[in-house]
Each structure stands twice: as C-alpha cells, then as structure tokens.
Amino acid sequence: MKRIVITLGIASLALAAATAAFAGSMATTATVTGTAGISLTHSATATVTNTIDGSDQIASYAPALAVIDARGLGTGWNLTISATAFTDGASHTLAQPTIAAVASACHAGSTCTAPSNAIAYPLTVGTVAAKFFNATANSGLGKIDVTPTINIAVPGNAYAGTYTSTVTLASVAGP
C-alpha cells in the first residue's frame, strides 16, 4: 500500500513538472485600422404635401441620414446643407427652409459614441453650404442616424403648384 501511495506521489510530481514545463505567457497585439473618410447616405428624394387654406402654415419633412465615422481618429465631423429656392417654374417661390431641430442616435445593432452637437436651432438653409449638425472631438464615432426636421413656410397667399428645390448634403471632417 505504501508503494502505491509513493508511486502516485511521484506520478503527481512528474505531471505537475510536465505541466509547468509547457506553461508560459504570450504577448498579443491587436491592430485596428480605420477607413479613409466619413460617409453620409440618404434617400434620393423627399416629398412634402400641404393644402393651402388661406392661413400661414409650416410643412415639414425629416429625412433619415446615416453617418458612418469609422476613421478611428476621434477628430469629429460636421454635416452641411444648402438648398436652391423652392420655385414652381412660373416665378412663384417659397421662403428658404429652416432646420427646427436635429435628432441623433446610434444605428440599431451598432455601438457608437454619441455625437455631441454644438449647433443652435432654428437655422435657415441658404444657397451656400452651412453646418447644420456636428460631432465635436471624441464624439460621433461609429454608425449614427441623424434626422433633421426641416420646415418650409407656406404663406396664406401662396400660389397652388408643385414647388421644387435641390438640397445638397455633405459630411466634412472636423467639428
């Protein structure tokens, strides 16, 4: 019986020594690279419908924009907007639209750093590109859904017709 216990003891020491001989540490490096720029996607058209009734009205639309900042820099970004005048082709126009507010959220299924916006509203959309939303430094990383509420003033004395405008949106590096 003593011989079995001694044999088991020696076998246990040999197993422990063998295990220790194969143990060790390993240095691991993870390299994460970013993309070259910021992307912005949106629908190709927006339609607003309004029925005039003699009173001043506001017609609104809220385009869904998708911003992806996968650069991995944390240097921030901004969105710009410009628009041509709303015209019906018969010399009737509507005032330039205004941005009343902008909502933002991480895109579903994505982890992001929420953008910290420093733009004040309301903001008139002119014919020259202007910032309407931004992500300050160390914010806005990942996939972000941005939804501006754009208001079009329709005066009580507006002419009935189809008014069109070309809206230009862009994403630009830097807050």
Image (cartoon, rainbow, N blue to C red):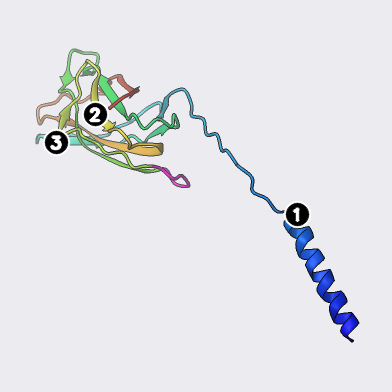
Whole-percent x, y for residue 12 in the image? 80, 70
Quarter the N terminus occupies:
bottom right
Whole-percent x, y for residue 9 in the image? 81, 75
Whole-percent x, y for residue 131 in the image? 24, 25
Q: How far apart are marks 1 and 2 (CA)?
A: 63 Å
- The residue carrying mark 2 is 132
The quadrant in which residue 2 appears is bottom right
Residue drawn at x 15%, y 23% is 95
Q: Distance between the residues labelled 3 and 1?
A: 81 Å
- The residue carrying mark 1 is 21
Which of the two discs, 3 and 2, labels the residue nearer the N terminus? 3
Which of the two discs, 1 and 2, labels the residue nearer the N terminus? 1
Q: In this view, does 4 lie above or below 57?
A: below
Q: What element carries label 2?
A: strand
What is the span of residues highlighted in magenta in the rendered image? 107-112
Q: Which amino acid does label 3 sit on?
A: Gln
Q: What element carries label 3?
A: strand
Residue drawn at x 43%, y 23% is 37
Badge 1: how crowded within 10 Å, few (<14), some, or many (20+)?
few
Q: What residue type is labelled 2?
A: Phe
Which of the two discs, 3 and 1, labels the residue nearer the N terminus? 1
- The residue carrying mark 3 is 57
- Horizontal side, residue 124 vs residue 139: left or right: left
Q: Which amino acid does label 1 sit on?
A: Ala
Q: Is residue 111 magenta?
A: yes
